[in-house]
Image: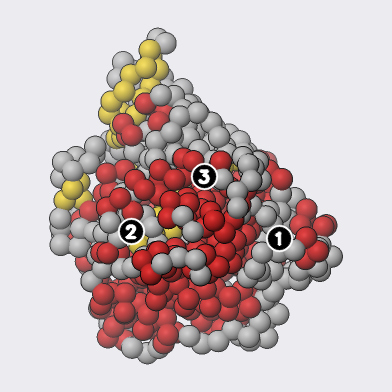
Amino acid sequence: MKTIKKYILTIATLASLFISGCTEEFLDIPPAGKVDELSFFTDTTNIDLMLSGVYNTFLYKENCDVYDQYRWWLGSVASDEAEAGGDSPTAWGEGYSFDDHTYTAEASILKMIYGSMFNGVSRASQVIEKLPEAKQMAGAEMNKKIDVRLGEAYFLRAAYYFILTRVFGGVPVVDHILLPSEYKTLPRGTVKEVYAQMEKDLLAAIPNLPYESEISVNDKGRVSKGAAQALLAKIYVYESSYYTYYGVNDVRFGAVQNRWKEAFNLCQEIIHSGEYELVGLNGETYDTFWSPTTNGFRYLFSVEGNNNRESIFAIQHIYSTGYSNYSYGCALNQFVGARALLRKDGSFPTQNDHAWGFWVPTHKLFDLFDANDVRRKVAIGQSPDSITGYPGDSLFGQVTVSGKKESGWFTVANTIYQATGLENFKYEIGPHNSMIIDGGFQGNTQNMYYIRYADVVLLGAEAAMMDNNTGKALEYFNLIRRRARNCGDGIHPADLTGTVTKQEIMDERAREFAMEGERYFDLVRWKEAEKEIGGSRMEWWENNSSFNGTTVRYEEKNNFFPLPAIETSKNNYLKQYSGW
């Protein structure tokens, strides 16, 4: 994606054209000089530059990327599939609060997500308002490009809003450039009201966007028609889930409707388009640092696999050096890689030989897989086990011995503090890790999925099940099983026979999207979070007498996170949900 990445590098110099409506000063980028806005938007290069600035919101960092912290802390650690990890039980105190559900409205992670996502909404709204004006001064060819870029802006506004609604539920609905007088008077919308705005944006985007196959190599990573369709299908599934499991009398959701059939039809349209595929469905292999014959599922989570045929929309990353709130690389890989590796000279591993060991899988997730399901091996790493005789998993990393860096293949080691004894393996990128390249932790080049084709297939199976289309539900469900099987031993997991049930969907989504930040939001929409999380115990508590009898307390209020306190303090019309 050379073109859009090139523009990301220079966006800060012109960002002042659309940075209005930021909720926090730390998101502001200082202006580099005044430019006539209408003239600016009639220049092809400048239009691309400004759209890259809308994409650029996904790159915002406070140490680690905002998008990845949203997936890591809120979408995963808050659920039953992962724990906080790190070098001690509460190494990242605020992050740990999402593990045991003791977080408050003061949490800086919530403030960061709310502020940065609304920053993205504001940037997109600026472009959406300005580009139609520019069309009046442009020729036919230029107008075609403006329409495509408008489609991208509409999608991105909906994409930022989807994150906001998953995290907070209803939020203020903003479809224009805000006036200063509006900031302190915007009320909180219902989930349905926000969804209605997202649906409107996506329906405006779809006709103007190109198919994935029509996007040039240099523009890979830009929004496609399939991306807008996929997000709209996912919104329909979420709305239908809230309708089905919470009903129409919950004030948080508003007038949600049954849209299972619409969701299924849209998923089927994407599936029949032929634009995407389940990578490795027929046992294809790929050349990566892991192996010249890497299975398709592992390939999905490699730098070599960036912008593969399963990637519908992903956050793009390029190598960068240094430290910045808007660096172009990804920091996640260093935060969540295995903490220690067994040294070849037999010396004892230190706790930060390799990476920092946050976001670790639970044994509840581990046990959900068939032992021979390749997806478990890709998602979860294990150290040697003297009881079972398991030799331990290996990765390409770096250790320091006698003051010298040694890179190569090492076995994962146990550390002094064991959160769960398991490691997150979906973000191990070996020699591509920027810590190995130059000692910087924000320069990694693995793209991070916003939505991949497997999600469309499983959402289609779920929507078909809910619409009593048992044949299609089973067909799509088993496509996911078939890919996993052909990427592994050719036997496991076996096809499902009989009828697809809600429990089968729940379990298959947990396996397919393990450690990708989907689990918590799935549990909430299914109204299963209290059952799966409430009353549970974190694994590291078991060996700490201070936590005897302690369990996680989960209440209805925890279905959505509290609005940041700084936002409700500035706007008396913005109210917390009951319990917060």
Q: Are marks 2 and 1 in contact (CB under 8 Å)?
A: no
Distance of mark 3 from mark 1, alpha carbons? 32 Å
Instruction: Give the numbered dot on residue 11.
Output: 3
Please state the horizontal and vertical placement of residue 556, each as a whole percent of the image.
67, 69
Disc nearer the start of the sequence (2/1): 2
Report the amino acid beneath label 1. Answer: Pro
User: Based on the displayed image, in which of its 4 quarters is residue 381 positioned?
Assistant: top left
Q: Which residue is mark 2?
A: 311
Instruction: Give the numbered dot on residue 350.
Output: none
Is residue 578 left or right of 393 when viewed as pictured? right
Above or below: residue 513 compared with residue 353: below
Sort mark 1 into few (<14), some (14-19) or many (20+) by Cα contacts within 10 Å.
many
The residue lying at 49 percent from left, 41 percent from top is 10
Q: Are marks 2 and 3 in contact (CB under 8 Å)?
A: no
Please state the horizontal and vertical placement of residue 229, each as a whole percent of the image.
40, 73
Disc nearer the start of the sequence (2/3): 3
